Amino acid sequence: MDDAWAGPTVGQVGELAVLDRIVRRLPAGAPVLGPGDDCAVVAAPDGRFVVTTDMMVHGPDFRWAWSSPADVGWKAAATNLSDVAAMGATPSGLVIALAAPQDTPVAVLESFADGVRQAVDALSPGCGVVGGDLSTSATFTVSVTAFGDLGGRGPVLRSGAHVGDVLAVSGELGRAARGLARLFRDGVDEHREPSRAVTVASGADADPDVDRQRRPVPPIADGVHAAAAGATAMLDLSDGLAIDAGRLARASGVSLALDPLPELDAVALHGGEDHGLLATFPPHVALPGGFRRLGLVVARGDADLVRDGEPVPTTGWDPYADWDGAAG
């Protein structure tokens, strides 16, 4: 059992003490002001900033049987940092709200904060947590709002792809989905309920793909690299390559033709939570950073996404359609 689940609870300690123990563990970054007042003040050098928010709820988004509190903190930070990067911005601050059951040990929240700090230090050094809120709930819930600095450039939207542009991706495809599949196969008990003991005994806990499911590693710096190189459109691959590519195609009024690449198997196409960056670039541009070619932008046809002339279903993760009460 994770050591975080021992010790006094949030209900026993109280909000002020819990806040003090969490804040000291979080990355400070370089805000103009924050945390500690009613609002943080974050610099916006060119008068504009990007902002995004994302929620993680125990059950549909993570399970304690499969993820440590530090894992959840890492993932909560990483998923929001990736959204900022997808606009071509540099993450500048995070605001985090937590709602936890009264009997949650304080050490769980401390471990969560450690995970946030680890993710920020690894993925976007210089970003910090500038504020947040604590509440109580029957279900552990995390809500993160992230801010980003555009650096004087315009944002990279989903709607800017042009016919003839190169379709490219930075980051891994399919690993998080393979990890989740392994957890559902080898991390559940005889009743098909997630089980920490079974996950460890089966070896799934040590699977690198499982680790990617729990702790995605989005290529945050490549968002700025893409914007500087002239990316015409970009988005974060949170729900799966096919479904997110369909969103970009519809927003831009084009279709996307995939190259016949071996890496584009069913899991890479339809698995979610890799949090890579999908972007389009003018044909004369050298692909920056870790971007690699996946295909071309073509004139709008009957399908958003095609491969070898055949439509590719633009399906992926849908929290309302896919969650059956045992998702991870």
Image: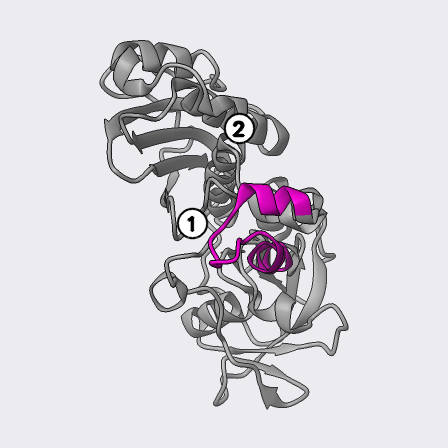
Looking at the image, is 275 positioned above or below residue 97? below
User: In which quarter of the view is residue 268 placed?
Assistant: bottom right
Q: Residue at x 59, y 59 (%)?
A: 177
Is 202 on the left or on the right of 146, as rendered? right
Is 136 on the left or on the right of 202, as rendered? left
Q: Nearer the viewer, residue 189 or 18?
A: 189
Magenta region, residue range: 176-201
Residue for badge 1: 61
Q: Nearer the viewer, residue 68 or 38?
A: 68
Q: Give the crowd class for mark 2: few <14, some 14-19, many >=20 residues within 10 Å.
A: many
Is 136 on the left or on the right of 116, as rendered? left
Looking at the image, is 251 positioned above or below residue 149? below
- Residue 47 point in image, percent of width and height: 36, 33
Question: What colour scheme has been applied to the protein in the rendered image?
Answer: one colour
Q: Residue at x 33, y 37 (%)?
A: 140
What is the secondary structure assignment of the residue under circle 1?
loop
- Residue 293 point in image, percent of width and height: 71, 65
How far apart are the alpha carbons under marks 1 and 2?
A: 16 Å
- Residue 2 point in image, percent of width and height: 54, 27
Q: Residue furthest right?
A: 262
- Residue 71 point in image, percent of width and height: 54, 35
Most frequent secondary structure within the magenta stretch: helix
Looking at the image, is 204 positioned above or below residue 35? below
Question: Can residue 228 be spotted in the picture?
Answer: no
Q: Nearer the viewer, residue 269 or 91?
A: 269
Residue for badge 2: 115
Question: Is residue 181 in the magenta section?
Answer: yes
The answer to whether marks 1 and 2 mark residues whose Cβ atoms lie closer than 8 Å is no
Q: Residue at x 58, y 49 (%)?
A: 213
User: Amino acid under label 2?
Assistant: Gly
What is the secondary structure assignment of the residue under circle 2?
helix
